[in-house]
Image (cartoon, grey):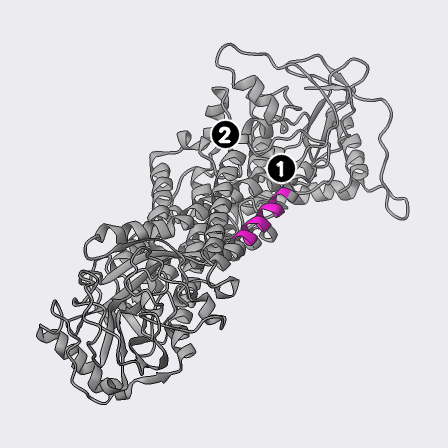
Amino acid sequence: MDRQESDHYYYHQQQKSFPHGTYSSPQYSSFSYAEQPLPQPTDQDGNFQYAALQSRKREASTNKSHDVSSTNRGRTWKQKMSGWRFGAILFAIAALIVLVANVCIAIYAVRESGASATADFKPIYTGDCARTKALNTWLHLTINVLSSILLSGSNYCMQVLSAPSRKNVDEAHAARKWLDIGIPSLRNLRVMTPKRRALWVLILITSAPLHLVYNSIFSQSWTRQAYEAALVTPDFLAGAPFDAGYTEYSTAREGGRRLFGEIQANSSTYQRLEPMECIKAYNKKAILDRKTVLVVTSLKTRPLLSTSYGPDSPARLDDGSTNPVFAVEDFVGNEVGTGTWNWMCDNLYDYSSDEGCDLTDVLSGNKEWSPFMPGVKVEYCLSEYLGEQCALDFSFGLMMVVCVCNLIKLSCMVTLCFSSGTTPLLNIGDAVSSFLDAEDVTTRGMCLAGKKEIKQYWDKREGYTPVEPLTWTRTSMRWFRACSTWRWAVFALLSSASIITSIVLLGLGLSNSRSGGLKSWSFGVASIYDGSPYVITYGHELYQPHRLVANILLANLPQLVISFLFLAYNSILTSMVMAKEWSDFAHERKTLRVSAPVGKQRSTYYLQLPYRYAIPLLLSSMLLHWVTSQAIFLDRRIVLQVWWGEPYEDNDVGSVSTVGYSPVAAIICLLIGVSMLVALVFVALGRYKPGIPLAASCSAAISAACHLERNEPDAAVLPLLWGVAASEQWDRIGHCAFSSLGVREPVDGNRYA
């Protein structure tokens, strides 16, 4: 119904309701209607349409009473399912599906790995690193979809729980306080019942541990081989006896002899590598697929470099000493994997740097490769090839934390679905309908009061400021004014933290890519497998078990930040979209969109944020959570050392947990985050159509616009328009309100109350 049609309706109704042409206000002097007749709308044949409008009103009134008392099962089911309970039931079902999925995954993983109820990790798959990475990627994608569904359901139910009832609003208004309508609110916590407040708190606090550990339930680990590197002659390969001349810690013990004996016996099975192939195979930060390397040289006159099996005693033997084994670098490798090892250069015992030596000139062909010592000419290498050894690990203890949080959320949602009590005002349609059906006298005479004016009048601690008639000024406000300053501040803080984190990771990646260049970058945990030094922190799981827990929390902290960022983003977008719906009532006559429709009122399966906003936001959140899980992640390394010929694990170095990061994924996170931020800013800079005060989520401002001045018992179920319902003339005061009858646009400079 457009303004011309509604104005004609208004003209005839005012003749019935106010035959003398005047209207009495409870607070102010009487209003006089304009004596000029309003335009009378007609159909295409010029026939008057008043009868059609009256018929529509009677139909709405009949539908209203019928909906309340109807026993028709179809309508009763539809009526119940169209309310907020339908959404809560859907999210409860989703939470149940997520819980079942988590339990099934846990049962399968425990059966495969034999994991116990601790934070320890056990492998459920061991094999090719590419396959392990693919499994890990898809599992984390699934995890982030499930966690995003739980987060959305939590947000929905928390908004329902924080929605005030009409009784809450009346009590707050009587105390000159206002509540939030249609948005997630902390302000409303003080008026919630203890039961609803407890449910709200439980849903909130279970989100923190869930997002702090969910992405670490599954993690990839890789086995890093410590290895022996020896400079040998062809005689050693032919089985010549060796002693290496070591007098300390080595061949004087049986373990050392057995180790070199095994190497000599198995050397025929080693893979032959040409010098440049050998350099490329071992010039890595982490060796995943190879172990012992024998560098074969024809040199037979150089001395041994040391009398000890290690760097403790670098005393040289006589120059005349010869042996099939010229030099040995033992236990090559460390838990983190940084630097090129000194044996590959001619400074074997230069321990001044942990970063190893530089082979740039050798790789570029400007210098001949001379490993171990100057003057060594390499014929070829023999390498013990093992193949990649990667594993997909599972933590039953972390999964238990997730399942418990999931179960608590599900219980809260089910409790909410079957809760009874007063009907909450979930959106502006619910609030307007309630205020039209039962007037709120505390806001009478404040028809032009928006949220800003309510705060000026009601938020004062002392005294009472009488509300004077306000002068109408036609202004077009930007969307961002619908949100409070503190909501924008929280969002800005979380956004800044996320963007700064991405930039820092990107900067670290750039600084650490000097040796490999940008071509060594890869997505997710592949940045670890290719030997890149993208590690934030690490700890020995044997001697520093607390570091594992700390690394889990550190790796998942961005997930928690993004979760709260989603809630803040959703809150801001909801506030702006709600204000847009409110402003449309000044330009388009339409029925109210309510959570429990009656008559011609519109139903909705969402609270306030339409699907065209909610679905892209949810998908963007899922994508951002997943990419973040690939940008910063828990990475575990199993270091296999060699101790007198016996490999061992969880000893000396053993298992190491690290927090790794991927610069490429950090860039993608940054792009997604900035895109979402730009989209929000673009929306926020839009302008509302002028014509109605900006009430935002303020219950008092909404109430102030809902004071009927004519006989409209069924206005709430009819198409409504906001405007001048009682016209002003000369120095008289006008009145603006929602009305199913005719209204005019407010006039600049005129006063209304």
Identity of the amino acid at label 2?
Leu
Q: Secondary structure at mark 1?
A: helix
Residue depicted at 9% across the width and 72% down the height: 252
- Residue 30 point in image, percent of width and height: 72, 14
- For mark 1, does the 10 Å Cα neighbourhood hold few (<14), some (14 to 19), or many (20 or more) residues? many
Q: Is residue 77 visible?
A: no
Quadrant showing the C terminus: top right
Q: Which residue is mark 2?
A: 179
Most frequent secondary structure within the magenta stretch = helix
Q: Quarter of the image holding residue 19?
A: top right
Identity of the amino acid at label 1?
Ala
Residue depicted at 49% across the width and 38% down the height: 493
Q: Is residue 411 magenta?
A: no
Q: Alpha-carbon distance for marks 1 and 2?
A: 16 Å
Which label's residue is closer to the chain start, 1 or 2? 2
* Highlighted magenta segment, given as a residue range: 670-681
Q: Quarter of the image holding residue 648?
A: bottom left
- Residue 124 point in image, percent of width and height: 29, 71
- Residue 389 point in image, percent of width and height: 31, 74
Report whether 369 appears left or right of 452.
left
Q: Which residue is mark 1?
A: 579
